[in-house]
Image (spheres, rainbow, N blue to C red):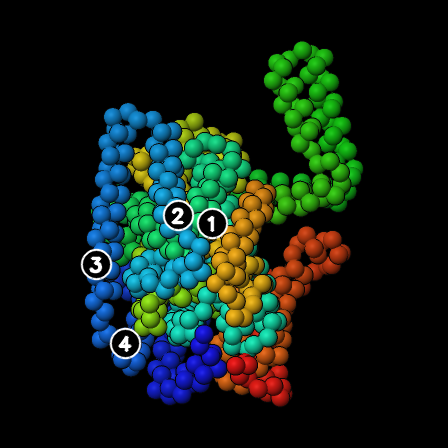
């Protein structure tokens, strides 16, 4: 194995490389943090777009792609790796190109055949089932074909994946259920930047693309040069000793487990919709497809499965958004034309805010919130009063021998009451907060194109709201970017390329393939919002489309409607959509054939499965390879570690499935939290370990513990349930930063602690030979 200390010395000796890094990082900072900070001042309309919105939704992404591509081209030329030609490797890539083209052609023919079959009368249930089982069977075949017990193949796919295909695999690994299912929905609900207390919107587009600049410039090529297997391998090899590797392995398990629970939840959501089975059974069905690939073939099988999954998910995303753009604007290239609808949405929002019917709905939600507030003043008495009132109604119904269904409904209402005062307080507090949120204009949603809450030119409260909103946006964007550079399941993918040059090129391809979806997600959010505001709102409740009831049956939190003001006409504030439904219901909303709905569900399943594969593989490898690492192990010991990785992966998958079945917080929040954990645990020590020779083992251990520990503490102490349990009043927020962005403190502390202890420590930075 290469000596990491020597390699680090070689990196730091390239002064010209640092100048390139400096210029590119400065451009990256200006295109991300600079644009966001001045977004409110960039509202001038250029070519039909608010300039600040366009930069956040598209312009910055183009800059990020250019940064990564320029760095790869210049660095590869500098290292003399562009002109290297291997005849056998070139022939291998040509074979891969032919197989890939054949696969894409077969997939398109499969879609066409299903569309024809649907027109000829094939039932929707069969369309969904065929999509599910055909795609999962394809992934299973790849897993079986790629099965291996060879350590190099299992951990890093034999380091033989060409850059373009590794780019597709990275994109599929990266574009999880959060990207495919939740991002467009988050943009629909949160607009440009979310609310004062819940940052969101375009922060995910900026954070999850801008982070790849850090991956390319600071991490990926340097890790690939070391020729290791896992991310904790780097910490063990660079700093020596057992503790750096062990802490890194623990952090890898922690952030990956948080991430994988969200993916398995998405798997259950989609599988239950495709087949009609219960949510929990859907989780188990989808999990089978995950385990076949990651359990049998490791990184070798997972890589080629992810390549096939990328094609499915990108087609599934682009087809409906292109159709909606063509339907509304006559042009299928949605990212370039949806600015017209953004302007119309701004006008529709003004009309809805002043609509008398919408105001009636708002007043009713406010009244309900007041009722819950009154109940919370005397929880036990209110609960007893409700219980007695329902019992009295049941006795009345029984005495007058009314329809039995009314008695059954009353008994169900009685059974649904909270069991005790504690659960009543929790439920009523949640209901009060929900009604207060919906008692706001637009159902509590911010104006779509407005950057940040409040007004910098308004009252003192408005100015504070603006400042806090912008601060939280910047903090979350920082965590998403830095977390991207620290997520183990992503970084491990760059071990699979043949050379360092291909690792750099692979990052560029990855960002290009990711951008195809990320540029379209804001477009989809705008097109769906316009469709709902202009077509769905104002319909009679009896004529609402059937997809609303179907998705509500899968999970009531996804979509709910109620005639709040009693006029039998749907108002915008009476419709509540969860972030996870916007993409999944787009084909039905746009009137597309059900075969497209099946394709979208299959795309969401592919996104969740591809990321779950990589995450479970990372967790299994951390538990088996890193916790039980022994230097100088024999080949037989390496094979035993591979087998142990497989069984650890199986155990973790079952535990994650159980947690996901409890329907935890929304996908986007779970994923965002894992970025804070990964950024705080890995990035400070990893970057310093690569670029600063004086970084010591003691400092690395202290930096990881301090950064990760502070991040976990900040998230925990601001969890509502924990604060109630400990009797804490007020908030525990620092500088009004929300807990999802806890990594902003953890990363800073990680850097400071590592640098200070390295300067004070007398230990030599080089690991033992």
Contact (CB < 8 A) between labels 1 and 2? yes
Callout 3–callout 4 Cβ contact below 8 Å:
no
Residue matched to label 3: 94
- Residue 340, percent from left and from top: 29, 53
Rounded to the nearest whole Å, what is the CA distance between mark 3 and mark 2? 22 Å
Which element type, helix, strand or loop, lies under badge 4?
Answer: loop
523, above or below 456, in the image: above
**Residue in view at x 58 percent, y 63 percent:** 628
Side (left or right) of 395 relative to 549: right
Asked whether the residues under the numbered discs 2 and 4 touch, taking CB atoms below 8 Å apart as contact, a structural biologist would say: no
Q: Is residue 532 positioned above or below 157 on the image?
A: above
Q: Residues within 10 Å of mark 4 (few under 14, many from 20)?
A: some
The residue tagged with tag 2: helix, strand or loop?
helix
Binning the other alpha carbons within 10 Å of mark 3 as few (below 14), some (14 to 19) or many (20 upward) gives few
Q: Residue at x 54, y 70 (%)?
A: 631
Which residue is label 4 attached to?
Answer: 81
| Residue at the disc numbered 2 | 143
Q: What's the CA distance linking mark 2 and mark 4?
A: 33 Å
Residue 676 on image: x %, y %: 54, 64
Q: Are marks 4 and 1 in contact (CB under 8 Å)?
A: no
How packed mark 1 is, by other alpha carbons closer than 10 Å (few <14, some 14-19, many 20 or more), is many
Q: Nearer the viewer, residue 83 or 504?
A: 83
Q: Earlier in the sequence, mark 2 or mark 4?
A: 4
Return the x and y of residue 470 as percentages of the image width and height.
Answer: 50, 66
Q: In this view of the protein, which residue sits in the foreground, 86 or 497?
A: 86
Which residue is tagged 1? 295
């Amino acid at each position: 194995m290469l000596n990491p200390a020597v390699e680090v010395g070689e990196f730091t000796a390239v002064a010209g490389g640092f100048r390139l890094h400096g210029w590119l990082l400065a451009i990256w900072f200006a295109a991300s943090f600079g644009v966001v900070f001045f977004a409110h001042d960039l509202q001038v309309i250029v070519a039909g777009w608010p300039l600040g919105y366009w930069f956040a939704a598209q312009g910055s992404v183009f800059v990020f792609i250019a940064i990564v591509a320029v760095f790869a081209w210049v660095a590869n030329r500098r290292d003399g790796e562009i002109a290297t030609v291997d005849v056998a490797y070139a022939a291998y890539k040509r074979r891969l190109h032919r197989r890939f083209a054949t696969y894409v052609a077969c997939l398109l023919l499969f879609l066409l055949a299903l569309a024809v079959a649907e027109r000829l009368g094939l039932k929707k249930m069969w369309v969904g089932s065929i999509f599910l089982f055909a795609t999962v069977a394809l992934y299973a075949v790849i897993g079986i074909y790629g099965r291996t017990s060879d350590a190099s193949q299992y951990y890093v796919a034999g380091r033989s994946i060409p850059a373009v295909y590794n780019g597709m695999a990275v994109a599929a690994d990266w574009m999880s259920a959060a990207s495919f299912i939740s991002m467009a929905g988050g943009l629909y609900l949160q607009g440009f930047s979310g609310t004062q207390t819940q940052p969101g919107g375009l922060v995910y587009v900026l954070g999850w693309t801008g982070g790849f600049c850090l991956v390319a410039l600071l991490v990926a090529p340097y890790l690939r040069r070391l020729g290791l297997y896992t991310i904790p391998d780097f910490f063990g090899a660079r700093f020596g000793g057992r503790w750096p590797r062990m802490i890194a392995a623990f952090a890898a398990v922690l952030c990956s487990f948080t991430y994988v629970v969200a993916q398995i939840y998405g798997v259950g959501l989609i599988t239950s919709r495709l087949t009609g089975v219960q949510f929990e059974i859907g989780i188990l069905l989808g999990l089978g497809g995950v385990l076949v690939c990651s359990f049998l073939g490791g990184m070798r099988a997972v890589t080629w499965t992810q390549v096939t999954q990328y094609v499915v998910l990108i087609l599934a995303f682009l087809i409906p958004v292109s159709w909606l753009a063509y339907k509304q604007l006559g042009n299928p290239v949605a990212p370039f034309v949806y600015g017209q609808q953004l302007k119309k949405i701004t006008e529709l929002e003004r009309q809805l805010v002043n609509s008398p019917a919408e105001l009636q709905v708002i007043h009713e939600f406010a009244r309900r919130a007041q009722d819950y507030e009154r109940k919370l003043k005397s929880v036990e008495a209110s609960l007893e009063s409700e219980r007695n009132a329902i019992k009295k109604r049941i006795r009345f119904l029984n005495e007058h021998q009314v329809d039995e269904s009314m008695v059954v409904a009353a008994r169900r209402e009685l059974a649904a009451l909270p069991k005790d005062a504690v659960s009543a307080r929790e439920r009523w507090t949640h209901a009060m907060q929900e009604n207060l949120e919906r008692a706001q204009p637009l159902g509590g949603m911010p104006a779509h194109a407005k950057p940040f809450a409040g007004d910098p030119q308004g009252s003192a409260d408005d100015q504070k709201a603006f400042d806090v909103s912008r601060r939280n946006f910047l903090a979350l964007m920082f965590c998403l970017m830095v977390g991207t550079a620290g997520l183990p399941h992503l970084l491990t993918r760059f071990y699979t390329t043949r050379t360092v040059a291909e690792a750099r090129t692979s990052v560029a391809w990855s960002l290009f393939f990711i951008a195809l979806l990320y540029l379209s997600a804001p477009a989809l959010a705008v097109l769906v919002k316009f469709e709902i505001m202009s077509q769905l709102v104002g319909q009679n409740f009896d004529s609402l489309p059937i997809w609303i009831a179907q998705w509500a049956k899968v999970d009531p939190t996804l979509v709910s409607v109620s005639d709040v003001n009693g006029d039998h006409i749907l108002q915008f504030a009476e419709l509540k959509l969860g972030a996870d439904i916007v993409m999944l219901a787009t084909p039905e909303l746009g009137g597309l054939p059900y075969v497209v709905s099946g394709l979208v569900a299959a795309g969401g399943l592919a996104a969740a499965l591809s990321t779950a594969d990589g995450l479970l593989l990372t967790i299994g490898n951390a538990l088996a390879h890193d916790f039980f690492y022994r230097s100088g192990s024999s080949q037989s010991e390496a094979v035993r570690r591979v087998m142990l990785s497989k069984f650890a992966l199986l155990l973790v998958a079952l535990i994650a499935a159980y947690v996901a079945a409890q329907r935890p917080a929304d996908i986007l929040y779970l994923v965002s939290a894992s970025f804070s954990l990964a950024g705080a645990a890995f990035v400070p020590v990893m970057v310093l370990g690569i670029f600063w020779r004086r970084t010591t083992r003691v400092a690395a251990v202290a930096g990881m513990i301090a950064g990760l520990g502070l991040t976990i503490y900040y998230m925990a102490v601001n969890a509502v349930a924990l604060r109630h349990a400990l009797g804490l009043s007020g908030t525990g927020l620092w500088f009004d930063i929300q807990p999802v962005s806890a990594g902003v403190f953890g990363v800073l502390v990680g850097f400071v602690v590592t640098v200070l202890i390295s300067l004070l420590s007398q230990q030599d930075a080089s690991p033992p030979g």
